[in-house]
Amino acid sequence: MTNSIGTVRQDQFKFQLKSVEKIPIEIWENNSEASKHIATSIAEAIKDKQKDFQPIVLGLATGSSPVKVYEELVRLHKEDGLSFSNVYTFNLDEYYPMQPDAVQSYVRFMNEHLFNHIDIPQENIHIPDGTVEMDGVQDYCDFYEQKIESLGGLDIQILGIGRTGHIGFNEPGSWETSKTRLVRLDNLTREDAKGDFTNEDVPYRAITMGIDTIMKAKEIHIMAWGAHKAPIVKVAVEDEVSAAVPCSYLQHHDNTQFYIDRSAASELTRFKMPWLVGICNWDDDLITKAVTWLSEKLSKPILKLTNEDYNENNLSDLIIEEASAYQLNIRVFNRLQHTITGWPGGKPNADDSTRPERAKPGKKRVIIFSPHPDDDVISMGGTFLRLVDQKHEVHVAYQTSGNIAVHDHDALKYIEFYNEYVTSVKDEHITNDMLAAEESIRNKQIGQIDSDTVRKVKGLIRRGEARAGARFCGLQDSNIHFLNLPFYETGKTKKKALSQDDIEIVRNLIEQIKPHQIYAAGDLADPHGTHRVCLESIFQAFDQLKKEKWMKDCWLWLYRGAWHEYPIDEIEMAVPISPEELLRKRKAIFMHQSQKDSAPFPGGDAREFWQRAEDRNREAANTYRRLGFAEYEAIEAFRRWKFDWQ
Ligand code: F6R
């Protein structure tokens, strides 16, 4: 298998026979390049207008999607002298109510990402006002519409898409004729915004431009990055236009361009089921994808699929190439069967020619990298326990402190304990720092960043929990490593860029242990998140160490974070977990008390981490069972990352 990120590779798709996409799409390898491209086309439009001494009106969005576009526009201003003096801007939306100086306000967002760094005249900037009185909102919205029209309408509108399919804050149910107005936010949108509103309620309402306002723009650039956007992108561009997915209205706009990365493209039919829309270059990966798809679609185990099943479901090409369903079924069945192993570190003294791991050495050195202090047990607790039980030398390395994900009330509990204890024993050495920390939590303002001491305490809370979890899995303290990578230490959800300091810490540990196996969170699909950055630090460390002889034997196994599992056709090692092991895994997760009940950043999922992990591991086992394999209680899945020099 070759490394891919869950989509069909370009070379597997010979040509497209029909297109089911109703909005033009450009798929980019990464969002940085795509964002530069969008920024350049905006810059060209600005300059064209400047040549004719004309103003230009831009419709702007907030959120994570356009951040790199703004970054590039700022760079073009600073380095290439692009002027914004003829630019008028109208932002799509603002929470309601919202003070402009609040941390979460879109005024602040726009100032920080764009306006503070360019030469746009202040009076040319328009952002819906989250402070107008309720009885004046409608008049205010009408005024906003008129203002856009009085300047000749929007020349270019940039958009992101929400997981509900919203554009602006036009949530499902918005009409095509809607104009700027006050709206109620969808629950999923509020969930997604929770990360910005730590310890506080996300507003229920917003002021947003309407669908009609947006559709009148002469040119629209819409973007979506990351796998979490893939399902909604597919529906918006492939399904019928519907008020249930407001973004689909863009199918009626004649100058819209959708920019997505490979992860956001992964649900498009041309990638997910290319045989439905085109001719494929069949290789083993694609064949496995098609056969497992057919088996699931018809609810038939692989070995029961017939020639007719293939012929009736757009897969007759496969039968032509393989001669018969019988041979094809056996080939795919065997391939999947060989992914299953109870010996994640390799089975000593066994023939390993069809096993996922090497038999030798019988006792391996292993590092489990865990981006946050609990990903090890959540994502691969069963395999962790097995590796220890099977006597491998297992190390765990917690890459970040995880300190932003601890509730204030938990930190206060520890700080008060410390202060009261030290006071009660009449120790003079009680530090001012800790008293100040107690004060700062008690008086914390909404959105305020924790002091260094509070962050330290929160990090220590997670450290203690991680240690307890790893000890529960059978590790000695000397095999538990806390890396505290510096990129994470901002106290905010937004992190610093990965630097050589981070990479060096990871590299040093790998060099010290010289492992045969490394496990890492392989959330390649998440372009912004901590997991992606942590993985990047490992990739870079591998790159810097690749000349070392022992690195040839260092295999990198990727597991997926708490959110979703690998599709069955991408799994290369499936480790069954018995009912008892699943219970032990649950207990290891329970050691992370600060993340229990309701973690500060649970994502759009109300289940606790142990429930998510169990549901996911059971579902993996069920998928194998439905395809016709043995029935296991649960399965943890891995995919091997192969470097071209290995
Ligand atoms: C922002 C806006 C929203 C976002 C959408 C995607 O002004 O109106 O529609 O574009 O929620 O958000 P991100 O880009 O954060 O995924």
Image (tube, rainbow, N blue to C red):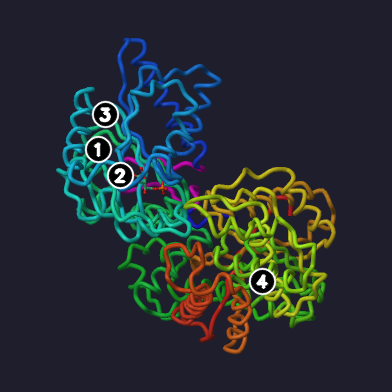
Left or right of 508? Residue 17 is left
Which residue is tagged 4? 417
Which is more foreground, mark 1 or mark 4?
4
Ranked by sequence position, the earlier of labels 1 and 3 is 3
Instruction: Describe the element under mark 2 as helix, strand or loop.
Output: loop
Secondary structure, mark 4, is helix
Query: Dot 2: within a 10 Å radius of its alpha carbon, few (fewer than 14), some, or many (20 or more) residues?
Result: many
Location of mark 3 (residue): 154
Stretch of the chain drawn in magenta: 9-30
Look at label 1 and name its amino acid: Ile
Spatial distance from mark 1 to mark 3, Cα to Cα? 8 Å
**Which labelled disc corresponds to residue 214?**
1
Nearest to the observer: residue 311 or residue 522 = 522
Three-letter code for the amino acid on which mark 4 is drawn: Phe
What is the quadrant of residue 43 in the picture? Answer: top left
State the separation of the CA atoms marked 1 and 4.
Answer: 55 Å
Q: Amino acid at mark 2?
A: Gly
Q: Is mark 2 within 8 Å of ligand 1?
A: yes
Residue type beneath disc 3: Leu
Q: Are marks 1 and 3 in contact (CB under 8 Å)?
A: yes
Q: Is residue 20 at least partly visible in the picture?
A: no
